[in-house]
């Protein structure tokens, strides 16, 4: 690994990690990465070895997580908690021991908040139970968010924990049990359209509300937050809620498919409303997304489907 770098991306082979490396490189940053070759970061010995081998950097972007989708998580709550908590605790300790000069920028999910039918600001953190489908995963994310804070307080370190929107874009997983919400919807739409179907199968309640951000915008938001905040837990989104039904219609418009939208009644639905109140971040930075929902979907469709032949 190079002895000179500005930034270290932990999780360099993942969805966010690959896009972080691309975008930081485009901005002229020298980037090092810890990826799959380093081994399982839930193993302390392997995690410490990876951090020891890494160059000294100014910033660490910790974006590693073991993630599964929808109903799958109901049956593996213990696994989601155990593996992810070990990863996060190992990264925190390796940061303290081997990269104390670096600012740790870690990422969280809106699933760490309790269910509520209004936008969630940071004061709602740890004020109620998590949705049953994400209890283990969300608790591990809370270990990271609180862990980064207490490590910084005890050891005089610098950190920022950004809670993100639901992100979509290139390099995302397409496996049914790992894909993220919008990427999975787009992939299903393309497959059904190419199969000649006239009905788009959309899982879940079409009235479910989420926030969606194209990955370039989400990373840009994190970098903007880094310039304005330190030692904070911060909602980092665009305050642009959308229903699942609206997202489905945007997909059919983006790919030029005249299809009926069908939601199977037995399909999995998560929390009915998860929207972040990101006013602190937006007011402090003036950041706004470059892609609206339709534009982001069109960009992803062009990159991952029009550039490759149909099956």
Image (cartoon, grey):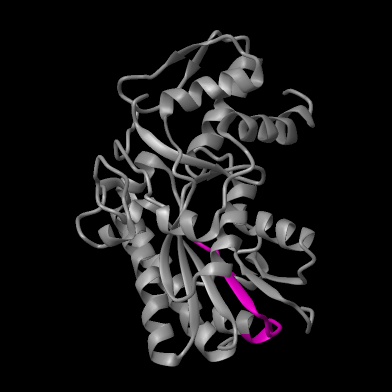
Quarter placement of the C terminus = top right
Q: Residue at x 37, y 50 (%)?
A: 277
Residue 15 place in picture, x, y as percent: 61, 52
Q: With 272 as the anchor, is 14 left or right in this view?
A: right
- Determine which quarter of the picture holds residue 234: bottom left
Q: With 20 as the anchor, is 83 left or right in this view?
A: left
27 relative to 74, above or below: below
Q: Is residue 272 visible?
A: yes
Residue 255 place in picture, x, y as percent: 65, 20
Q: What is the magenta range?
A: 52-66
Q: With 244 as the anchor, is 12 left or right in this view?
A: right
Quarter placement of the N terminus = bottom right
- Determine which quarter of the picture holds residue 140: bottom left
88 relative to 306, above or below: below
Queried whether the magenta region covers residue 55, the answer comes back as yes
- Determine which quarter of the picture holds residue 79: bottom left
212 relative to 27, above or below: above
Nearest the viewer among 21 and 79 is 21
Is the magenta region chiefly helix, strand or loop? loop
Residue 253 place in picture, x, y as percent: 60, 18
Q: Residue at x 41, y 53 (%)?
A: 279
Total number of numbered discs in the rendering? 0
Nearest the viewer among 204 and 277 is 277
Q: Residue at x 77, y 72 (%)?
A: 30
Q: Is residue 66 visible?
A: no
Queried whether the magenta region covers residue 210, the answer comes back as no
Q: Residue at x 64, y 49 (%)?
A: 216
176 relative to 67, above or below: above
Residue 71 place in picture, x, y as percent: 35, 40
């Amino acid at each position: 690994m190079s002895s000179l770098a500005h930034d270290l991306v932990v999780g360099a082979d993942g969805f966010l990690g690959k896009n972080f490396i691309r975008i930081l490189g485009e901005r002229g940053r020298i980037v090092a990465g810890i990826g799959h070759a380093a081994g399982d970061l839930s193993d302390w010995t392997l995690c410490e070895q990876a951090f020891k081998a890494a160059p000294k950097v100014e910033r660490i972007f910790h974006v590693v997580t073991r993630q599964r989708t929808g109903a799958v998580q109901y049956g593996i709550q213990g696994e989601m908690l155990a593996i992810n908590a070990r990863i996060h605790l190992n990264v925190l300790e390796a940061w303290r021991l081997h990269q104390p000069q670096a600012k740790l920028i870690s990422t969280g999910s809106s699933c760490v908040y309790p269910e509520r039918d209004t936008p969630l600001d940071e004061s709602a953190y740890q004020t109620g139970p998590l949705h049953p489908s994400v209890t283990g995963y969300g608790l591990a994310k809370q270990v990271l968010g609180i862990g980064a804070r207490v490590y910084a307080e005890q050891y005089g370190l610098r950190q920022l924990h950004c809670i993100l929107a639901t992100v979509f874009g290139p390099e995302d997983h397409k496996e049914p049990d790992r894909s993220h919400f919008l990427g999975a919807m787009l992939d299903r739409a393309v497959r059904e359209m190419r199969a000649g179907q006239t009905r788009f199968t959309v899982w879940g309640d079409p009235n479910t509300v989420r926030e969606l951000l194209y990955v370039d915008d989400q990373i840009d938001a994190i970098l903007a937050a880094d310039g304005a905040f330190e030692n904070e837990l911060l909602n980092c989104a665009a305050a642009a809620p959308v229903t699942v039904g609206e997202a489905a219609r945007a997909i059919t418009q983006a790919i030029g498919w005249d299809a009926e939208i069908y939601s199977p009644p037995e399909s999995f639905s998560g929390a009915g409303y998860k929207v972040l109140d990101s006013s602190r971040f937006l007011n402090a930075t003036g950041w706004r997304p470059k892609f609206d929902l339709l534009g982001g979907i069109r960009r992803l469709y062009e990159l991952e489907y029009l550039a490759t032949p149909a099956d």
